[in-house]
Amino acid sequence: MNSDIFRAFRSRNYRYFFAGQSLSLLGTWMQKTAVSWVVYAQTQSKFMLGVSVFATLFPSAVFSLLGGVVSDRYNRYRVLLLTQVLSMAQALLLTLAVYFKQDAVWEIIALSGVLGIINAFDVPARQALVYDLVDNKQDLPNAVAMNSTMLNLTKLLGPAVAGFAIEQLGAVACFGLNALSFVAVIGSLLALRLPAYVARARTKNLMGELTEGFQYVKDTPTIRFLITMLGITGLLVLPFTNLMPVYAKDIFRGTATTFGLLDGAIGLGGLIAALYLAALKPSQDLNKVLMTNMFVFGVGLVLFSYTPWFWLALPFLVVGAFGMMSQTTISITLLQTLMLPAMRGRVISIYVLVYTASVPLGSLLVGAVSERIGVQPTVLAEGLLALLIALLYVRNLRQVKAAGLAVSAATTPPAEVATAA
């Protein structure tokens, strides 16, 4: 392993940022796990699981373009500080709602919607701020790679810790610990030493720039294909993760700890994928890797769907999550390499819009379908759909090679776009 793998930590601001975000993300995944468990435990409804995810993600989709504009037009450090304070308030209200009301499903869903709106402004500001935190800009790819590793490690640990906390202390403890975690991230932000903010002149019309971005995507076949495939995958395949409480409780006859281990397996697959992508050789053909990992995604889901033994299902879930994380991150890498620099912000915002809209809508769809045909047939169907989507990638790869547009990892290291994933 390269001895410079932690070189981004040479920047003081990034060290503080990384430490605060690590604790905050751990609390966030604990809260996400607790929300799913409480909603399903109180309603016994797979559809309501989809509603809870929809409530968080759909507002992010609606306000994502506005969030990107706010991040570019105003002091993103102050924007991020404000969103963190508001997220802490949301977590406190969620804690109080669950503590004082035994059946707080609709309060949880309403507060999830509030968090979705906050996230629409938080994510663009947080991702963009990383550039300002690294002293040596050559360390930026490493900083973003560390962010990806942090995200997947907390996704691995958070659900497992949440499962233990729910069993021993109750779900309200997860919400309270998440609220407490924001003390660390707000403290780390206040400790940053950033240069004085200089406001930029606003010379372009917002709607005109957005229209130009949509037209560019429409007129560029490779970019249009990638965004379309990400949207289809988000709608039809990615929502399989919302059914994990059902697998834990009904299929494997387990407890909150069982659910935490299932969610943790997804996080482990994502972490392995992040490390795998960071280690890709510069000459690697990313189109081919994308196609292969889409097949891996589908095979993992097909094997997991009807596996009756819990400890065998976990590695199958890790395989599926590996393919899921890989195809998403590589798709963003290809978008970054194919788009014109002047269009980068707008294309990424369109991707965020499509992705964050398709996943919550897919959550509703998958929740409704699983109510009718059962959770195992639904996940099997999602795995088969992933294999069909992989065939579309095969067709596209042939077209790309025929046109001489195959993109290698030498253009943009996968680490540079890990944040987007």
Image (cartoon, helix red, strand yellow):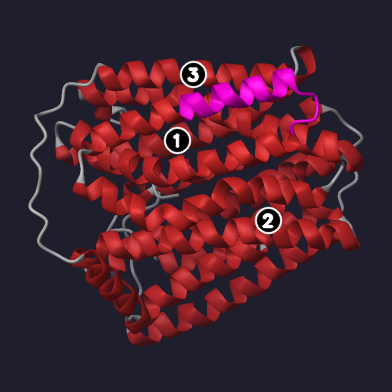
**Which amino acid type is shown beneath numbered disc 3?**
Ser
Q: Could you say which is closer to the camera, residue 309 or residue 244?
A: 244
Q: Regarding mark 2 in the picture, which secondary structure is present there?
A: helix
Q: Regarding mark 1 in the picture, which secondary structure is present there?
A: helix
Residue 123 in picture, x, y percent from top left: 39, 43
Residues rendered magenta in the picture: 87-104
Residue of label 1: 149
Residue of label 3: 181
Q: Compute the Cα span from label 3 to label 2.
A: 28 Å
Residue of label 2: 363
Label drawn at residue 108? none
Query: Nearer the viewer's eye, disc 1 or disc 2?
Result: 2
Q: Is residue 204 left or right of residue 9?
A: left
Query: Nearer the viewer's eye, disc 3 or disc 1?
Result: 3
**Which amino acid type is shown beneath numbered disc 2?**
Ser
Quadrant where the N terminus is found in the figure:
top left
Q: Is residue 393 left or right of residue 14?
A: right
Residue 383 in picture, x, y percent from top left: 73, 62
Residue 291 in picture, x, y percent from top left: 53, 68
Q: Is residue 42 covered in magenta?
A: no
Q: Is residue 258 visible?
A: yes
**Residue found at x 51% / y 56%:** 356
**Which amino acid type is shown beneath numbered disc 1?**
Thr
Within 10 Å of the Cα at label 2, are there few (<14), some (14-19), or many (20+) other Cα atoms? many
Instruction: Work out whether mark 3 precedes mark 1 in sequence or the reverse, and give the earlier one.
Output: 1
Q: Is residue 296 visible?
A: no
Q: Are marks 3 and 1 in contact (CB under 8 Å)?
A: no
